[in-house]
Image (tube, coloured by chain):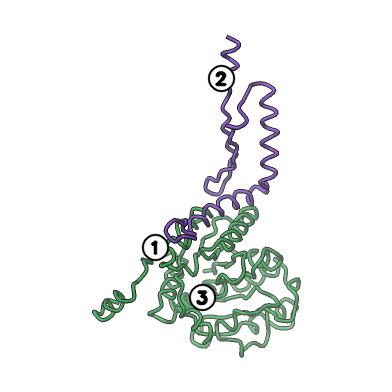
Chain colours: A green, B purple
Amino acid sequence: MTAQVFTVTSGKGGVGKTTAVANLATALAMDGKRVVCIDGDIGLRNLDVVMGLENRIVYDIVDVIEGRCKLKQAMIRDKHYPEMYLIPAAQTRDKNAVSPSDMVRICNDLKPDADFIIIDSPAGIERGFRNAIAAADRVLVVTNPEVSAVRDADRVVGILEAEEKSNPALIINRLNPALVKNNDMLSAEDVLDLLGIRLIGIVPEDENVIIGSNRGTPIVTDAKSRAGMAFRNIARRLQGDDVPFMDLAPQSGLWNAIQRLAGRK
Amino acid sequence: MDFFTRKRSASSAKERLQLVLVHDRTDLTPGQLESLKDDLLKAISQYIEIDPDAVRIELEKDGRSQRLVADIPLKSSSRHRAG
Protein backbone atom coordinates (compact mmCIF):
# COMPACT_ATOMS: atom_id res chain seq x y z
CA MET A 1 0.00 0.00 0.00
CA THR A 2 1.40 3.37 -0.96
CA ALA A 3 -0.07 6.80 -0.25
CA GLN A 4 -1.84 8.92 -2.82
CA VAL A 5 -0.59 12.50 -3.01
CA PHE A 6 -3.16 15.27 -3.37
CA THR A 7 -2.15 18.89 -3.85
CA VAL A 8 -4.66 21.62 -3.06
CA THR A 9 -4.09 24.80 -5.05
CA SER A 10 -6.04 27.77 -6.41
CA GLY A 11 -4.06 30.57 -8.03
CA LYS A 12 -5.81 33.28 -6.05
CA GLY A 13 -5.18 33.59 -2.32
CA GLY A 14 -7.90 33.53 0.30
CA VAL A 15 -10.28 31.14 -1.43
CA GLY A 16 -9.97 28.47 1.27
CA LYS A 17 -7.05 26.20 0.32
CA THR A 18 -5.73 25.81 3.85
CA THR A 19 -9.23 25.31 5.24
CA ALA A 20 -9.84 22.65 2.59
CA VAL A 21 -6.58 20.84 3.44
CA ALA A 22 -7.27 20.85 7.19
CA ASN A 23 -10.84 19.65 6.67
CA LEU A 24 -10.12 16.97 4.08
CA ALA A 25 -7.21 15.61 6.13
CA THR A 26 -9.33 15.51 9.29
CA ALA A 27 -12.24 13.87 7.47
CA LEU A 28 -9.88 11.20 6.08
CA ALA A 29 -8.44 10.65 9.56
CA MET A 30 -12.01 10.33 10.92
CA ASP A 31 -12.48 7.56 8.33
CA GLY A 32 -9.49 5.79 9.88
CA LYS A 33 -6.95 6.73 7.21
CA ARG A 34 -3.30 7.55 7.83
CA VAL A 35 -2.81 11.12 6.64
CA VAL A 36 0.19 13.43 6.38
CA CYS A 37 -0.39 17.12 5.58
CA ILE A 38 2.45 19.24 4.24
CA ASP A 39 2.30 23.03 4.45
CA GLY A 40 3.92 24.18 1.20
CA ASP A 41 3.68 27.88 1.92
CA ILE A 42 7.26 28.64 3.00
CA GLY A 43 7.44 31.97 4.83
CA LEU A 44 3.66 32.16 5.33
CA ARG A 45 2.99 29.18 7.55
CA ASN A 46 -0.73 28.76 8.31
CA LEU A 47 -1.87 25.17 8.23
CA ASP A 48 -0.55 24.68 11.78
CA VAL A 49 -2.90 27.30 13.29
CA VAL A 50 -5.91 26.14 11.29
CA MET A 51 -5.28 22.60 12.58
CA GLY A 52 -4.58 23.82 16.12
CA LEU A 53 -1.02 22.45 16.20
CA GLU A 54 0.97 25.69 16.32
CA ASN A 55 2.33 25.09 19.83
CA ARG A 56 3.89 21.75 19.00
CA ILE A 57 6.26 22.77 16.23
CA VAL A 58 9.93 22.01 16.80
CA TYR A 59 11.22 21.27 13.32
CA ASP A 60 9.87 22.22 9.90
CA ILE A 61 10.19 21.05 6.29
CA VAL A 62 13.32 23.11 5.62
CA ASP A 63 15.02 21.50 8.65
CA VAL A 64 14.31 18.12 7.01
CA ILE A 65 15.64 19.23 3.64
CA GLU A 66 18.78 20.76 5.12
CA GLY A 67 19.46 17.70 7.27
CA ARG A 68 18.95 19.28 10.72
CA CYS A 69 16.42 16.63 11.68
CA LYS A 70 14.93 13.34 10.55
CA LEU A 71 11.66 13.39 8.62
CA LYS A 72 9.86 11.72 11.56
CA GLN A 73 10.98 14.52 13.91
CA ALA A 74 9.26 17.16 11.78
CA MET A 75 5.98 15.23 11.69
CA ILE A 76 3.61 16.67 14.30
CA ARG A 77 1.02 14.22 15.50
CA ASP A 78 -2.55 15.56 15.70
CA LYS A 79 -4.16 15.98 19.12
CA HIS A 80 -7.26 13.93 18.35
CA TYR A 81 -6.30 11.66 15.48
CA PRO A 82 -3.04 9.80 16.17
CA GLU A 83 -2.81 8.69 12.54
CA MET A 84 -2.76 12.28 11.25
CA TYR A 85 0.43 14.32 10.99
CA LEU A 86 1.46 17.78 9.88
CA ILE A 87 4.80 18.75 8.40
CA PRO A 88 4.89 22.53 8.94
CA ALA A 89 6.32 25.12 6.58
CA ALA A 90 9.39 27.10 7.61
CA GLN A 91 8.40 30.56 8.73
CA THR A 92 11.70 32.39 8.47
CA ARG A 93 13.03 31.05 5.19
CA ASP A 94 12.40 32.11 1.65
CA LYS A 95 10.60 29.77 -0.68
CA ASN A 96 13.76 28.91 -2.61
CA ALA A 97 14.86 26.75 0.32
CA VAL A 98 12.62 24.02 -1.16
CA SER A 99 12.83 22.57 -4.67
CA PRO A 100 10.37 20.38 -6.59
CA SER A 101 12.71 17.40 -6.25
CA ASP A 102 12.85 17.91 -2.45
CA MET A 103 9.05 17.62 -2.36
CA VAL A 104 9.10 14.48 -4.49
CA ARG A 105 11.74 12.91 -2.23
CA ILE A 106 9.87 13.74 0.99
CA CYS A 107 6.61 12.35 -0.42
CA ASN A 108 8.36 9.18 -1.57
CA ASP A 109 9.76 8.70 1.94
CA LEU A 110 6.28 9.20 3.46
CA LYS A 111 4.37 7.01 1.03
CA PRO A 112 4.96 3.53 2.53
CA ASP A 113 3.51 4.54 5.92
CA ALA A 114 0.56 6.70 4.87
CA ASP A 115 -2.70 6.38 2.94
CA PHE A 116 -2.95 10.03 1.92
CA ILE A 117 -0.50 12.90 1.66
CA ILE A 118 -2.14 16.31 1.26
CA ILE A 119 -0.03 19.28 0.22
CA ASP A 120 -1.24 22.83 0.87
CA SER A 121 0.03 24.96 -2.02
CA PRO A 122 0.76 28.66 -1.63
CA ALA A 123 -1.26 31.11 -3.72
CA GLY A 124 0.23 32.20 -7.01
CA ILE A 125 1.96 30.29 -9.80
CA GLU A 126 5.57 30.75 -8.65
CA ARG A 127 8.15 28.44 -7.12
CA GLY A 128 6.05 27.39 -4.12
CA PHE A 129 3.20 26.34 -6.39
CA ARG A 130 5.64 24.39 -8.61
CA ASN A 131 7.01 22.65 -5.51
CA ALA A 132 3.52 21.79 -4.34
CA ILE A 133 2.40 20.19 -7.60
CA ALA A 134 5.68 18.35 -8.30
CA ALA A 135 4.77 15.29 -6.25
CA ALA A 136 1.01 15.34 -6.83
CA ASP A 137 -0.83 12.30 -8.10
CA ARG A 138 -3.95 14.43 -8.29
CA VAL A 139 -4.49 18.17 -8.01
CA LEU A 140 -7.53 19.70 -6.36
CA VAL A 141 -8.24 23.25 -7.53
CA VAL A 142 -10.19 25.38 -5.04
CA THR A 143 -12.17 28.37 -6.29
CA ASN A 144 -14.97 30.68 -5.17
CA PRO A 145 -17.94 31.53 -7.41
CA GLU A 146 -16.47 34.95 -8.08
CA VAL A 147 -14.76 36.47 -11.15
CA SER A 148 -11.19 36.87 -9.91
CA ALA A 149 -11.03 33.44 -8.26
CA VAL A 150 -12.45 31.70 -11.36
CA ARG A 151 -10.06 33.52 -13.67
CA ASP A 152 -7.03 32.54 -11.57
CA ALA A 153 -8.29 28.96 -11.29
CA ASP A 154 -8.41 28.82 -15.09
CA ARG A 155 -4.78 29.97 -15.32
CA VAL A 156 -3.76 27.27 -12.85
CA VAL A 157 -5.67 24.60 -14.79
CA GLY A 158 -3.89 25.77 -17.97
CA ILE A 159 -0.48 25.42 -16.28
CA LEU A 160 -1.42 21.98 -14.92
CA GLU A 161 -2.35 20.90 -18.46
CA ALA A 162 0.98 22.19 -19.77
CA GLU A 163 2.81 20.32 -16.98
CA GLU A 164 0.79 17.20 -17.81
CA LYS A 165 -0.69 17.11 -14.31
CA SER A 166 -3.89 16.19 -16.03
CA ASN A 167 -7.37 15.70 -14.73
CA PRO A 168 -7.49 18.20 -11.86
CA ALA A 169 -10.68 18.18 -9.81
CA LEU A 170 -12.56 21.31 -8.78
CA ILE A 171 -13.78 22.32 -5.32
CA ILE A 172 -16.19 25.25 -5.42
CA ASN A 173 -15.88 26.80 -1.99
CA ARG A 174 -18.05 29.37 -0.21
CA LEU A 175 -21.06 29.11 -2.48
CA ASN A 176 -24.00 31.14 -1.18
CA PRO A 177 -27.20 29.35 -2.32
CA ALA A 178 -29.44 32.37 -1.66
CA LEU A 179 -27.28 34.63 -3.85
CA VAL A 180 -27.19 31.98 -6.58
CA LYS A 181 -30.97 31.71 -6.45
CA ASN A 182 -31.19 35.48 -6.88
CA ASN A 183 -28.85 35.25 -9.85
CA ASP A 184 -26.35 37.39 -8.04
CA MET A 185 -23.69 34.71 -7.74
CA LEU A 186 -22.24 32.37 -10.36
CA SER A 187 -23.83 28.96 -9.92
CA ALA A 188 -21.78 25.76 -9.65
CA GLU A 189 -22.93 24.95 -13.21
CA ASP A 190 -21.67 28.33 -14.47
CA VAL A 191 -18.25 27.79 -12.87
CA LEU A 192 -17.99 24.25 -14.24
CA ASP A 193 -19.01 25.41 -17.69
CA LEU A 194 -16.37 28.16 -17.62
CA LEU A 195 -13.51 26.04 -16.30
CA GLY A 196 -14.32 22.80 -18.12
CA ILE A 197 -12.90 20.46 -15.47
CA ARG A 198 -14.35 17.74 -13.26
CA LEU A 199 -16.19 18.69 -10.06
CA ILE A 200 -15.37 16.93 -6.80
CA GLY A 201 -17.32 19.10 -4.37
CA ILE A 202 -19.34 22.22 -3.61
CA VAL A 203 -18.92 23.72 -0.16
CA PRO A 204 -21.64 26.16 0.95
CA GLU A 205 -20.67 29.35 2.74
CA ASP A 206 -20.88 28.63 6.45
CA GLU A 207 -19.89 30.92 9.34
CA ASN A 208 -18.98 27.83 11.38
CA VAL A 209 -15.87 27.48 9.20
CA ILE A 210 -14.42 30.65 10.76
CA ILE A 211 -15.45 29.52 14.22
CA GLY A 212 -13.66 26.21 13.59
CA SER A 213 -10.52 28.02 12.42
CA ASN A 214 -10.61 30.26 15.50
CA ARG A 215 -10.55 27.19 17.70
CA GLY A 216 -8.11 25.20 15.59
CA THR A 217 -10.79 22.54 15.13
CA PRO A 218 -11.72 21.84 11.50
CA ILE A 219 -15.45 22.07 10.79
CA VAL A 220 -15.72 18.45 9.59
CA THR A 221 -15.80 17.43 13.25
CA ASP A 222 -19.10 19.34 13.62
CA ALA A 223 -21.77 16.86 12.52
CA LYS A 224 -24.35 19.63 12.00
CA SER A 225 -22.35 21.96 9.77
CA ARG A 226 -23.26 21.88 6.06
CA ALA A 227 -19.76 22.94 5.05
CA GLY A 228 -18.43 20.16 7.26
CA MET A 229 -20.69 17.68 5.53
CA ALA A 230 -19.57 18.93 2.11
CA PHE A 231 -15.91 18.39 3.09
CA ARG A 232 -16.68 14.94 4.52
CA ASN A 233 -18.33 14.05 1.19
CA ILE A 234 -15.27 15.22 -0.75
CA ALA A 235 -13.04 13.11 1.51
CA ARG A 236 -15.16 10.07 0.68
CA ARG A 237 -14.93 10.84 -3.03
CA LEU A 238 -11.13 11.01 -2.64
CA GLN A 239 -11.33 7.46 -1.29
CA GLY A 240 -13.19 6.41 -4.44
CA ASP A 241 -16.74 6.38 -3.05
CA ASP A 242 -19.57 7.57 -5.24
CA VAL A 243 -21.31 10.18 -3.06
CA PRO A 244 -24.23 12.20 -4.46
CA PHE A 245 -23.88 15.99 -4.34
CA MET A 246 -25.73 17.76 -1.54
CA ASP A 247 -28.92 19.67 -2.21
CA LEU A 248 -27.85 23.28 -1.78
CA ALA A 249 -31.23 24.92 -2.24
CA PRO A 250 -31.44 27.98 0.01
CA GLN A 251 -33.03 27.20 3.32
CA SER A 252 -35.59 29.65 4.50
CA GLY A 253 -35.24 30.40 8.18
CA LEU A 254 -38.84 29.58 9.03
CA TRP A 255 -39.08 26.36 7.03
CA ASN A 256 -35.78 25.27 8.51
CA ALA A 257 -37.01 25.94 11.99
CA ILE A 258 -40.20 23.93 11.37
CA GLN A 259 -38.22 21.02 10.01
CA ARG A 260 -35.90 21.13 12.96
CA LEU A 261 -38.87 21.13 15.33
CA ALA A 262 -40.32 18.19 13.47
CA GLY A 263 -37.03 16.38 13.95
CA ARG A 264 -36.29 16.14 10.24
CA LYS A 265 -32.92 17.86 10.40
CA MET B 1 -29.84 51.27 -11.20
CA ASP B 2 -33.49 50.31 -11.39
CA PHE B 3 -34.19 47.15 -9.47
CA PHE B 4 -36.63 45.75 -12.04
CA THR B 5 -34.69 46.38 -15.23
CA ARG B 6 -31.12 45.76 -14.20
CA LYS B 7 -29.53 42.55 -15.38
CA ARG B 8 -28.67 40.23 -12.49
CA SER B 9 -24.96 40.29 -11.79
CA ALA B 10 -24.32 36.55 -12.21
CA SER B 11 -25.02 36.81 -15.96
CA SER B 12 -22.59 39.71 -16.37
CA ALA B 13 -20.00 37.77 -14.40
CA LYS B 14 -20.38 34.75 -16.66
CA GLU B 15 -20.34 36.72 -19.91
CA ARG B 16 -17.30 38.75 -18.88
CA LEU B 17 -15.44 35.67 -17.70
CA GLN B 18 -16.20 33.82 -20.93
CA LEU B 19 -14.46 36.58 -22.88
CA VAL B 20 -11.56 37.02 -20.48
CA LEU B 21 -10.81 33.29 -20.25
CA VAL B 22 -10.77 32.78 -23.99
CA HIS B 23 -8.19 35.58 -24.35
CA ASP B 24 -6.16 34.41 -21.31
CA ARG B 25 -5.99 30.89 -22.71
CA THR B 26 -4.84 31.95 -26.18
CA ASP B 27 -2.54 34.77 -25.03
CA LEU B 28 -4.26 36.93 -27.61
CA THR B 29 -5.42 40.40 -26.59
CA PRO B 30 -8.61 41.86 -28.06
CA GLY B 31 -6.33 44.33 -29.95
CA GLN B 32 -4.31 41.52 -31.49
CA LEU B 33 -7.50 39.75 -32.47
CA GLU B 34 -8.63 42.94 -34.25
CA SER B 35 -5.43 43.15 -36.28
CA LEU B 36 -5.59 39.45 -37.07
CA LYS B 37 -9.09 40.09 -38.35
CA ASP B 38 -7.88 43.01 -40.52
CA ASP B 39 -5.04 40.95 -42.00
CA LEU B 40 -7.37 38.06 -42.70
CA LEU B 41 -9.87 40.33 -44.47
CA LYS B 42 -7.11 41.94 -46.54
CA ALA B 43 -5.86 38.54 -47.66
CA ILE B 44 -9.33 37.27 -48.56
CA SER B 45 -10.27 40.48 -50.38
CA GLN B 46 -7.45 39.88 -52.86
CA TYR B 47 -9.42 36.92 -54.19
CA ILE B 48 -13.09 37.58 -53.56
CA GLU B 49 -15.26 40.53 -52.72
CA ILE B 50 -16.54 40.45 -49.16
CA ASP B 51 -18.65 42.71 -47.01
CA PRO B 52 -16.28 43.80 -44.20
CA ASP B 53 -19.15 44.96 -42.00
CA ALA B 54 -20.85 41.56 -41.99
CA VAL B 55 -17.72 39.62 -41.12
CA ARG B 56 -17.66 37.90 -37.77
CA ILE B 57 -14.34 36.51 -36.49
CA GLU B 58 -14.32 35.32 -32.91
CA LEU B 59 -12.52 33.10 -30.47
CA GLU B 60 -14.87 30.51 -29.06
CA LYS B 61 -14.51 28.22 -26.09
CA ASP B 62 -15.23 24.52 -26.45
CA GLY B 63 -14.66 22.78 -23.13
CA ARG B 64 -10.98 23.44 -22.39
CA SER B 65 -10.02 24.10 -26.02
CA GLN B 66 -10.43 27.24 -28.08
CA ARG B 67 -11.27 27.73 -31.73
CA LEU B 68 -11.12 30.70 -34.04
CA VAL B 69 -14.47 30.89 -35.78
CA ALA B 70 -14.90 33.03 -38.89
CA ASP B 71 -18.16 33.76 -40.65
CA ILE B 72 -17.38 35.71 -43.82
CA PRO B 73 -20.37 36.42 -46.07
CA LEU B 74 -19.41 36.97 -49.72
CA LYS B 75 -20.82 39.83 -51.77
CA SER B 76 -23.07 38.38 -54.41
CA SER B 77 -23.46 41.66 -56.37
CA SER B 78 -20.14 41.23 -58.21
CA ARG B 79 -21.31 37.98 -59.77
CA HIS B 80 -24.54 39.62 -60.96
CA ARG B 81 -22.57 42.47 -62.49
CA ALA B 82 -20.23 40.04 -64.22
CA GLY B 83 -23.16 38.00 -65.59
Left or right: residue A71 compared with residue A256: right
Instruction: Give the mark nearer the N terminus: 1 vs 3.
Output: 3
Q: CA distance from mark 2 to mark 3?
A: 67 Å
Marker disc for residue A242:
1
- At label 3, the amino acid type is Ala
Can you name the residue that lies furthest to the left here? A262
Task: Tell me the subunit letter for badge 3.
Answer: A
User: Are discs 2 and 1 located on one and the same chain?
Assistant: no
Could you tell me residue A22's position as x and y percent?
53, 77
The spot of residue A35 in percent (x, y) is: 53, 76
The residue identified by callout 2 is B76
Q: Which one is in front, A32 or A183?
A: A183
- Whether B54 is drawn above or below A168: the answer is above
Residue A232 is left or right of residue B36, and the answer is left
Q: Secondary structure at mark 1?
A: loop
Q: CA distance from mark 2 to mark 1?
A: 58 Å
Near mark 2 (Cα within 10 A), the count class, few <14, some 14-19 or many ≥20, is few
Element on which disc 2 rests: loop
Residue bearing mark 3: A25
Residue name at image x 66 percent, y 66 percent: A124
Dot 3: what SS?
Answer: helix
Mark 2 and 1 residues: CB-CB less than 8 Å, in contact?
Answer: no
The subunit carrying tag 1 is A
x and y percentages locating residue A194 in the rendered image: 52, 53
Looking at this view, name the residue that lies furthest to the bottom: A55
Q: Amino acid at mark 1?
A: Asp
Numbered marks: total = 3
